[in-house]
Amino acid sequence: MPRVGLFIPCYMDQLYPQVAMATLELLERLGCDVHFPSAQTCCGQPMANTGCSDDARPLAEKFLSIFGEYEYVVCPSGSCTAMVTHHYEELLHGRVGYEQLRKKTFELCEFLVDVLKVTRIEGRFPYKVGLHNSCHGLRELRLGSSSEMMVNRFNKAGQLLAGLEGIELVPLQRPDECCGFGGTFAVAEEAVSCMMGLDRIHDHEQAGAEVMTAGDMSCLMHLYGLINRQKKPIQVMHVAEILAGRQPQLKKDS
Amino acid sequence: MSDTLTIHHEHPDNATEFVANDSRAHWHDQSLWFVRSKRDKAASTLPEWEELRARASAIKQHAMSRLGDYLEQFERNATRMGAVVHWARTPAEHNQIVLDILKKHGATKVVKSKSMLTEECHLNPFLERHGVEVVDTDLGEWIVQLRHEPPSHIVMPAIHIKREEIGELFHKHLGTDAGATDPPYLVNAARDELRRKFLNADVGITGVNFAIAETGGFVVCTNEGNADLGVSLPKVHIACMGIEKIIPRAADLGVFLRLLARSATGQPITTYSSHFHGPMSGGEMHIVLVDNGRSDILGSSDFRRSLNCIRCGACMNTCPVYRRSGGHSYETTVPGPIGSILAPSRDAKTHKSLPFACSLCGSCSDVCPVKIDLHTQLLTWRKEIAVRGLLPWKKRLSMKFARILLGSTWLFSTAGKVGRWLVPKLPRFLVYNGLNPWGKQRELPPMPKESFRELYRKRNQSKG
């Protein structure tokens, strides 16, 4: 039984406990021994992406001391995973255990497909779903092929979702354009950020999506904020929630 | 010399202004997305696309690692064919070299094909101050020149201007019919006027896309043939290039020509790829090699690869921020992702907001035909800006605060608890006001009663 340290993004712990719970249940259902080390807080990405490496370093060190002991570290966020696997090098270079930590840390869908070798998850989700490909998962972790690159097409989250009964993944006009969240970018460049978000939502709407899903709740937090302000009917759900069997609360006309 | 317009604004302010005109911002976004889509289609026709990118990147990195040697080889070979090679460390030196050549020939009328280097050096205003008439003969460049504006894109300089506005501009300057917007009609009017300029020019200036060390020749790529026209009639040709334009061998050229136009506009190749080897008989050819900070970039292992750039503009077309904020919002000659790396190298203080005009989506790095790690370099610039103490105090302070808050598990979970309890109880005006940029167009997330760590603890307790 793989012993998994559950790495929950700080904002998810506080604001989206149901997504973290869905991740936990999903991993347990697939036969993992999952622990949530409660000393964890944040991976340090907000500071690192602002350029403040010195402020991010203590958090990276804290992370290593907390998660070093697990066989695997799994996180329902491509962005936070990429922080550990792609950006800790600079902060933890040469530290005992970092190289192992980097190799055993996985984003949720990546862990399911590449480590657990899950080909299909049992479940029913009879809705039209738009898959938003969060950027760091896509272009840093390569959880799917990006539209810019001329390589064989694949998508780990899409492949798992497609196996659900009744689901219809709708085609988007721009399959992997950024939603405009971008961490502090969302407030520093508020105007462009919101325009990007509204454009993403519109793309999913024109494709007929009832639910927008993504591997990163931070993108969905930004999109939900716009959707909720404009009172649009489209719902947002994290991929983990759908894979764990949660259903949307849709206000169906009929 | 600073690579900017005179009055400087921060990128978010310019972007906010651009986005305020919603229909125009969407029109701009869609025009450029259309070009990106054409690029995807063109790139997908080559099964070896990714291999070409890797090859181009390797050639450029090799060339940059021996730049001095290749430049001298280029100089020797170009000189052997009768060209005169000049070296300029700064824009001022470059401009003076060009002016001296013009003076020697008593030239007062110059036609110039598109050259971002001469934009970078602000050659036009310099020559105009010295009584020289310079006409940009690339249609887009000419349009922005008539409007007294800098280009907003390096490949499509007038991409921000609508057809109707060009109709008005031509009506004013060329006397075309008022209200005319028919592209063939307007293009013909421009062609007539530009023909006169070509016929009367004393000297032709071009940029350089690729300079080949092995041969001493260089290549200029255009879609309008204006570079050829501009240097075929006047006896004097001045070619201005940044020193990073060098490639080692003629055999390397095919790799770049196949990537350049496909990445830029989705064409298989530019309509004209003009090869120049020495002056025409009885004429003169001058090649001005310009550094302007490139050697400094070459000396930096973090940013060296930005010199791979072949100026295709693909990173602009794909950048979701560029498409929605317009090229002028960057206030640099080269805007977009690559410009946001190059500009701070010259003047970090002035351009400190540019590396943050980016959501770090990484699309630019994946689209770049020479595999510049653009978004990684933008992130590295943010660190540079922080290290140099150029971060705004609000950002600096909030990150220090976050470090303390997130450094302690107890502080973090207590602050979360208080926030989740308090925020829903506050009157709306205390949450949604001018101090909360998140809430201007967005609702805050729902505030759950319990955090995951609380739910997890309860779950474990009930399991016994």
Image: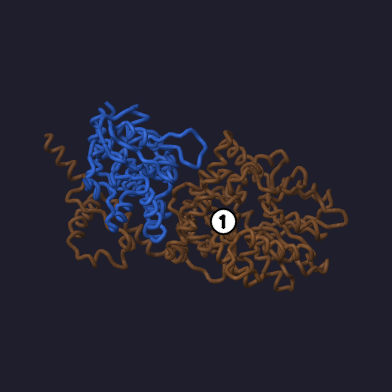
Q: Report whether A191 appears left or right of B250.
A: left
- Quick one: B9 or A158, which is closer to the camera? A158
**What's under tag 1, amino acid-wise?**
Leu
Q: Is residue B87 left or right of residue A53?
A: right
Q: Picture coordinates of residue A191 (x, y %)?
A: 40, 61
Q: Colour of chain B?
A: brown
Local crowd at mark 1 within 10 Å, few (<14), some, or many (≥20)?
many
Horizontal relation, residue B11 to residue A79: left or right: right
Q: Chain of mark 1?
A: B
Residue occupying the point 73% across, 73% down: B130
The residue depicted at 78 percent of the width and 65 percent of the height is: B201
**How far across and down, in percent of the image, does residue A250 sit?**
23, 46
Kindly state the secondary structure of the residue where label 1 is placed.
helix
Of B52 and B91, nearer the camera is B52
Q: For residue A158, which quarter of the picture?
A: top left
Question: Observer-nearest residue: A186 or A4?
Answer: A186
Judge whether residue B45 can be spotted in this image.
Answer: yes
Compared to B324, does B106 lie above or below?
below
- Colouring chosen for the image of the structure: by chain
- Image x and y of residue A43, in percent: 34, 46
Q: Quadrant of the C terminus of chain B?
A: top left
B208 lies left or right of A98:
right
Residue B175, compared with residue A60, is above or below; it is below
Q: Position of residue A124 (x, y in %)?
A: 25, 33
Q: Which chain is rendered blue in the image?
A: A
* Residue A47 appearing in the image: no
Residue that label 1 marks: B342
Please tell me which residue is depicted at 75% across the width and 65% down the height of the picture: B197
